[in-house]
Image (cartoon, grey):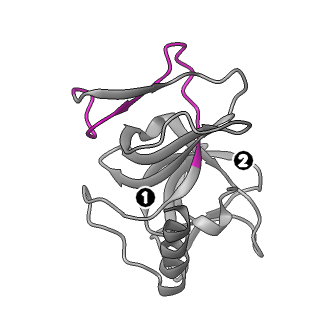
Amino acid sequence: MQRLCAGLVAAALLNNATPPARGEEANCGFRAWLTDTDPAGTYIRDQPSTTSRIVATLKRPAEPYAMGVFVTGYRNGWLRIGLAAPSNGPPVFDGEGWMASRLAAVTTRDFETPPRLYVQPSTASRVAAELPSGVNVTIIGFACGFARVRHQGREGWLRAGHMRQ
């Protein structure tokens, strides 16, 4: 599954994939980190809604950014995940579920060029800003090969190659 998703991300990067329309799902993935500070943990739900059934609760790790999730889609402020595992252990969730996107982040990294935020999810798009490597950015959207992110008031599309996996 992860190899297939990685292949889809690579294909999307090569083909400058068109993003899904607002509210639609994107179907490829990347690794993100939980940022939820709620001691009760992060709820994983069966649908992208606060009223849907909770299928799992991810316990808050002792160390920040120690719990990773594999993001496989996005819909209206919710991330679809297919796996959750601490950085030093086996998976604690291996299924499909949804979590609020504001509770996850990715870390930028240099990849041939500084991490760039694009106006649209395409490297042919205008560059809105450059970010330093190693900063955590909040995920607010998703398109194959890109995550829409926010950092210090700036928003844009970050290419998957500039996310630390």
On screen, residue 155 versus residue 151, left or right, reads: left
The image shows residue 122 at horizontal and vertical percentages of 49, 76
> Label 1: which residue?
142
| Amino acid type shown at disc 2 | Val
Q: Residues within 10 Å of mark 2 (few under 14, many from 20)?
A: some
**Which residue is found at the position 58% from the left and 32% from the top?**
35
> Within the magenta stretch, is there residue 145?
no
State the residue at coordinates (54%, 27%): 36
Above-or-below relation of 122 to 147: below
Q: Which residues are magenta?
A: 32-51
Question: Which kind of residue does numbered mark 1 sit on?
Answer: Phe
Residue at 74% of width from left, 37% of height from top? 88
| Predominant SS of the magenta segment | loop
Residue furthest to the left in view is 51
Q: Nearer the viewer, residue 95 or 51?
A: 95
Q: CA distance from mark 1 to mark 2?
A: 19 Å
Residue 40 drawn in magenta: yes
**Location of residue 21 with respect to 165 vertically, above or below:** below
Closest to the observer, 135 or 56:
56
On the image, the x and y values in percent for residue 2 come to 54, 62
Residue 87, how many percent across, how many down? 71, 39
Residue situated in front as seen by the camera: 131 or 110 = 110
What residue is shown with label 2? 135
